[in-house]
Amino acid sequence: MVIFRRSRTLGPVIASFNAIDDPLCVDFFQRPDKSYGYEEYRRDVETAEGWFPIGFHSARVFTQLEEAKRDAMQNVAWFNIDQDKTNGS
């Protein structure tokens, strides 16, 4: 079950997947309450100012990491299409 919640405290990143051909990534994190979430980011290579959230998925709350990954594959187009071409860390 997914619950939507606004939060500025995301927690530590436990997995990160980068798109090979684009400056995009999805980070999965665990909150202090042990719930999981994810966010999609874009890096502006022209200005080198870092990563910016573009998916606004971080308010979604999951009880298991695998639930968050399944939801990301449904809601982040490139992660769904290129899931076998992403670099996980």
Image (cartoon, grey):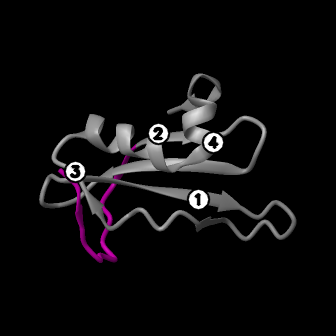
Q: Is 75 rendered above or below residue 55?
A: above
**In the image shown, does 55 or 17 lie closer to the viewer?**
55
User: Which residue is depicted at the point 22% across and 51% down?
Assistant: 62
Of 32 and 82, the residue lying toward us: 82
| Residue picked out by circle 1 | 41
Q: Which mark is residue 78?
A: 4
Mark 3: give few (<14), some (14-19) or many (20+) Cα within 10 Å.
many
**Which three-letter amino acid code belongs to the residue tagged 4?**
Trp
Residue at image location 73% in from the left, 50% down from the top = 23
Mark 1 or mark 4: which is in front? 4
Q: Closer to the N terminus: mark 1 or mark 4?
A: 1
What's the magenta region?
A: 1-14
User: Of tags 3 and 1, which is closer to the observer?
Assistant: 3
Q: Earlier in the sequence, mark 3 or mark 1?
A: 1
The residue where tag 3 is placed is: 62
| Mark 1: amino acid | Tyr
Residue depth check, mark 3 versus mark 2: number of the one nearer the observer: 2
